[in-house]
Image (cartoon, rainbow, N blue to C red):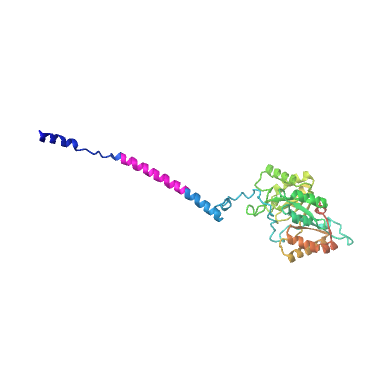
């Protein structure tokens, strides 16, 4: 009996240990990985913030908007600037240009009267200080103002106070476009007639008190007879004159002026296509020589400091030899 009892009790005291299933291990492992990833992300964010604070305290700059390359604007978009725009694109040589209008038929040149010259200063409106210095000269120079320029209203007011004549310096498409931008308000050969006239009228309305127009650049536009006729049809209605800056040998401006009987003249001399003192002095002397030969001559300069300096120095001698008159005194209908 005792033996059989021991035999019966032995199995009862032996406990069976159950092993956890494989799925349980996988579940616990997955939770652990998720927790580890979360800890790594949190640690990364904390370290990033700490690095930013460290850079800031040391005065180093993070990447700014200015460091990111900007997408270039379309060439005709108005430039967001108040610095001087591109000045005239000068012709490579004067020899192939059409001959100037004969001045003998314009002015009865008598030996007892001084020849006349007109000096137009183009590209006015972006540098108010130098414009005021030109206005302050004791001379009847003419200012050609660019439309949409930032200081045009102040300059126009001061010029009128001094009794100076004003023109619109009308931006037109050059042969170099779009590599060279004629600026806000430009007339382009790709424009439809309606768009062209609408832009022209907007430009004419932009600068008040103008007596006439001359072209800014425009070596491509002024060579288009059809579009110059469209332009002159509007200018005729305004009862203003047009002066051809003569930036191309292929200019058709004179024929349009003849067709619409718009008072007209042509530029004889560019004063500062080479911005060196001796070159500008030479151009002034050439201007006086042309005026002496034909009774009058018309020059175009630009608001460069060196042009202002030489004009101021030469002005007393110039005024002994010629009479400086407004640009409107030079124009006439083409016969």
Q: Position of residue 233 (x, y in %)?
A: 75, 45
Relative placement, left or right, of 15 versus 143 is left
The residue at 52%/53% (across/down) is 54
Residue 35 seen: yes
Q: Nearer the viewer, residue 196 or 106?
A: 196
Q: Position of residue 335 (x, y in %)?
A: 80, 51
The residue at 14%/34% (across/down) is 8
Examine the image and state in which quarter residue 33 appears: top left
The N terminus sits in image quarter = top left
Relative placement, left or right, of 71 versus 260 is left
Q: Position of residue 222 (x, y in %)?
A: 70, 51
- In this rendering, the count of numbered labels is 0
Q: Position of residue 289 (x, y in %)?
A: 80, 64
Q: Nearer the viewer, residue 240 or 181?
A: 181
The residue at 42%/46% (across/down) is 39
**Residue 40 belongs to magenta span:** yes
- What secondary structure is the stretch in magenta mostly built from? helix
Relative placement, left or right, of 48 versus 87 is left
Residue 333 seen: no
Compared to residue 178, the image places residue 293 above or below, namely below
The residue stretch that appears in magenta: 24-45
Q: Nearer the viewer, residue 313 or 98?
A: 313
Examine the image and state in which quarter residue 34 appears: top left
**Residue 74 belongs to magenta span:** no
């Amino acid at each position: 009996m005792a033996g059989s009892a021991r035999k019966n009790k032995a199995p009862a005291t032996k406990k069976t240990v159950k092993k956890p299933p494989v799925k349980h291990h996988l579940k616990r492992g997955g939770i652990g990985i998720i927790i580890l990833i979360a800890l790594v992300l949190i640690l990364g964010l904390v370290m990033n913030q700490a690095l930013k604070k460290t850079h800031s305290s040391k005065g180093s700059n993070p990447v700014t908007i200015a460091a990111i390359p900007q997408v270039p604007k379309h060439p005709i978009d108005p430039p967001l600037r108040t610095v001087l725009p591109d000045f005239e694109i000068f012709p490579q040589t004067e020899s192939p240009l059409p001959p100037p209008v004969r001045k003998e038929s314009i002015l009865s040149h008598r030996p007892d009267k001084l020849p006349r010259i007109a000096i137009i200063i183009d590209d006015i409106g972006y540098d108010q200080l130098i414009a005021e210095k030109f206005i302050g000269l004791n001379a009847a120079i003419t200012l050609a103002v660019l439309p949409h320029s930032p200081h045009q209203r102040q300059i126009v007011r001061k010029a009128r106070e001094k009794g100076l004549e004003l023109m619109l310096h009308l931006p037109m498409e050059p042969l170099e476009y779009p590599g060279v931008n004629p600026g806000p308000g430009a007339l382009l050969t790709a424009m439809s007639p309606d768009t062209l006239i609408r832009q022209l009228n907007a430009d004419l309305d932009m600068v008040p008190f103008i007596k006439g127009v001359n072209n800014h650049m425009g070596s491509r536009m002024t060579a288009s007879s059809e579009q110059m006729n469209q332009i002159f049809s509007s200018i005729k209605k305004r009862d203003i004159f047009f002066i051809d800056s003569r930036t191309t040998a292929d200019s058709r401006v004179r024929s349009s002026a003849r067709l619409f009987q718009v008072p007209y003249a042509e530029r004889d001399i560019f004063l500062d296509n080479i911005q060196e003192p001796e070159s500008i002095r030479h151009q002034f002397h050439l201007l006086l020589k042309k005026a002496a030969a034909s009774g009058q001559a018309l020059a175009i300069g630009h608001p460069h400091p060196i042009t202002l300096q030489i004009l101021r120095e030469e002005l007393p001698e110039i005024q002994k030899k010629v009479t400086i008159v407004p640009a409107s005194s030079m124009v006439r209908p083409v016969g």
